């Protein structure tokens, strides 16, 4: 089964729901998150074990 890598944009209160929701689908793997506030992205990335980056960096990724 093919896995689709996902980047979550927006690391506010709702972001945890997105992280949990993605775990419900075996075909989804969250690999990064971004926020207009870099400290929010960093905190959420550390919480969920993914990479914190900018929206532009997520969009430029080839994975």
Image (cartoon, grey):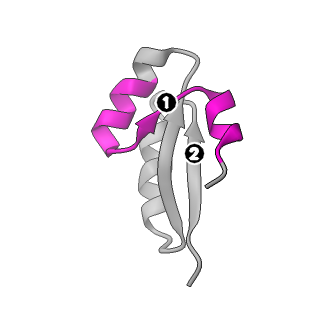
Main secondary-structure element of the magenta-colored stretch: helix
Q: Quadrant of residue 3?
A: bottom right
- What is the spatial separation of the Cα atoms under label 2 and label 1, in whole angstroms? 11 Å
Residue at the image point whose x is 62% and y is 38% from the top = 58
Residue at the image point whose x is 56% and y is 30% from the top = 10
Instruction: Please tell me how crowded label 2 is: few (under 14), some (14-19), or many (20+) other residues with Cα within 10 Å.
Output: many
SS assignment at label 2: strand
Tell me, yes or no, whether the highlighted magenta stretch contains residue 44. yes
**Label 1, on which residue?**
11
Count of numbered marks: 2
- Residue 45 position, x and y percent, is 38, 35
- Residue 43 position, x and y percent, is 34, 26
Residue at the image point whose x is 45% and y is 26% from the top = 41
Residue at the image point whose x is 47% and y is 74% from the top = 26
Quadrant of the snapshot with the N terminus: bottom right
Numbered mark located on residue 39 in the image: none
- Residue 11 position, x and y percent, is 49, 30
Quadrant of the snapshot with the C terminus: bottom right
SS assignment at label 1: loop
Q: Check the image and report above or below for 32 versus 62.
A: above
**Label 2, on which residue?**
7
Q: What stretch is highlighted in magenta?
A: 41-61
Q: In which quarter of the image is residue 48?
A: top left
């Amino acid at each position: 089964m093919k896995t689709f890598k996902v980047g979550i944009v927006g690391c506010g209160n709702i972001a945890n729901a997105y992280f949990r929701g993605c775990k419900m689908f075996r075909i989804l793997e969250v690999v990064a998150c971004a926020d207009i506030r870099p400290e929010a992205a960093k905190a959420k990335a550390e919480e969920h074990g993914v990479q914190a980056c900018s929206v532009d960096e997520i969009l430029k990724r080839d994975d």
